[in-house]
Structures are given as structure tokens and as C-alpha cells.
Image (cartoon, rainbow, N blue to C red):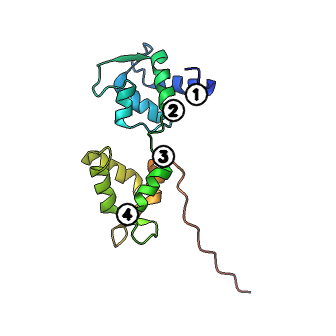
Amino acid sequence: MSDLSKNDIERASFAFSIYDFEGNGKIDAYNVGDILRALNSNPTLATIEKLGGTKKKGEKQLTLEEFLPIYSQCKKDKDQGCYEDFLECLKLYDKAENGLMLGAELTHTLLALGEKLEDNEVAEVTKDCMDPEDDDGMIPYACFLQRLCNKPVTAPAAAPAPAAES
């Protein structure tokens, strides 16, 4: 725990308190992944389980003192993706190299690759984060990822306004 800064400990304590639903100073280990993600980590399901998270509710309770080393280890873990990593992966589907990919390919990717999502999870993510498909079924994947990773969406540069005639 000594490698966590005072700010890290405060943030972890706050996130922990949100998931302390009974107010008894303990959280269900089932929620470890959610807390770590709330702390801007992106652990895999395997990492969460390795660190002490559980797949079922009610199997194990953790105190803050037990959670802090988990958070510390997760912060050190390099086996997490970030926005830039995910962007590079989606570029593989950008055949025209114009920032667009088929919306259907994105949906398929979320359903079939890596830590697969369920149909209802994909529907929720695409509803919340994906722009409408254009006439060719294409979507701007960087905007999707920015929303998904909670990054500010940067709008494309606007065309300069025509000069006013005098």
C-alpha cells in the first residue's frame, strides 16, 4: 500500500464507500471490477479474479484495508488496454483509412473478440456511444471509443466560413 499516494488512497476510499451498500465498512468482492474501473483502471476479468474479485455476489467481503493492495496492484498492472490501444485495433477495420468502419463489424467485434459482451450489453454500448450509421453502414470509430473511454469527443474541424463580400 505504501506505493499509493495520499490522493490515490482518498480516491480509493471514496469509490469504496460508494460500494459499501450496507455502511459496514465492507464491499462485496463481486464489485471489485466496478470500483477499479471507477478509479480509471481497465482490468480484464481475469485480472479482477486474480486480484480477489468474485464472479458471484455474496461469496466474499472486503474491507478498505484489503482493497487498497488490490487497487495498488491493478495500478501497476500493464495488462490493460487504453484508448490508444483500442484505437489501433479498430484501425484494422478501417479499409479506406478515413476514420470509418462498418457499424456491423464493430458490433461483431464486441460480441466475438476478447472479453466478449452479451447482446444486451452491446445494444446498450452502441446506443450510448455510437453515432448513427451513414448510408453505407459506416461509423466514426474514434468518436465511439472516446465516448466509451469517457474521453472528450473532439469534433472534426469545421470548414472555414466564406469571407463576407463588401
Amino acid at pointer 3: Cys
Q: Viewer-proximal residue, 49 or 58? A: 49
Give the residue at x 41% y 56%: 89
Q: Name the residue located 44 percent from the left edge and 39 percent from the top edge.
A: 79
Residue located beneath label 4 in the image: 93
- The circle on residue 8 is 1
Callouts 2 and 1 close, C-beta under 8 Å: yes
Q: Which residue is mark 3?
A: 82
Which of pointers 2 and 1 lies earlier in the amino acid sequence?
1
Q: Secondary structure at mark 3?
A: loop
For badge 4, the amino acid type reads Tyr
Q: Earlier in the sequence, mark 4 or mark 1?
A: 1
Q: Which is nearer the eye, 166 or 66?
A: 66
Q: Residue at x 35, y 35 (%)?
A: 45
On-image quarter of the N terminus: top right
Between disc 3 and disc 1, whose residue precedes? 1
Q: Earlier in the sequence, mark 2 or mark 4?
A: 2
Q: Which quadrant would the C terminus be assigned to in this image?
A: bottom right
The amino acid type of the residue labelled 1 equals Asp
> For the residues marked 2 and 4, what is the alpha-carbon distance in whole angstroms?
30 Å
Between label 2 and label 1, give the one nearer the viewer.
2
Label 2 belongs to which residue?
75
- Let me know if residue 55 appears in the view: yes
* Residue 13 coordinates in the image, percent (x, y): 52, 22
- Along the line of sight, which residue is nearer the eye, 103 or 123? 103
Is 58 situated above or below 117? above
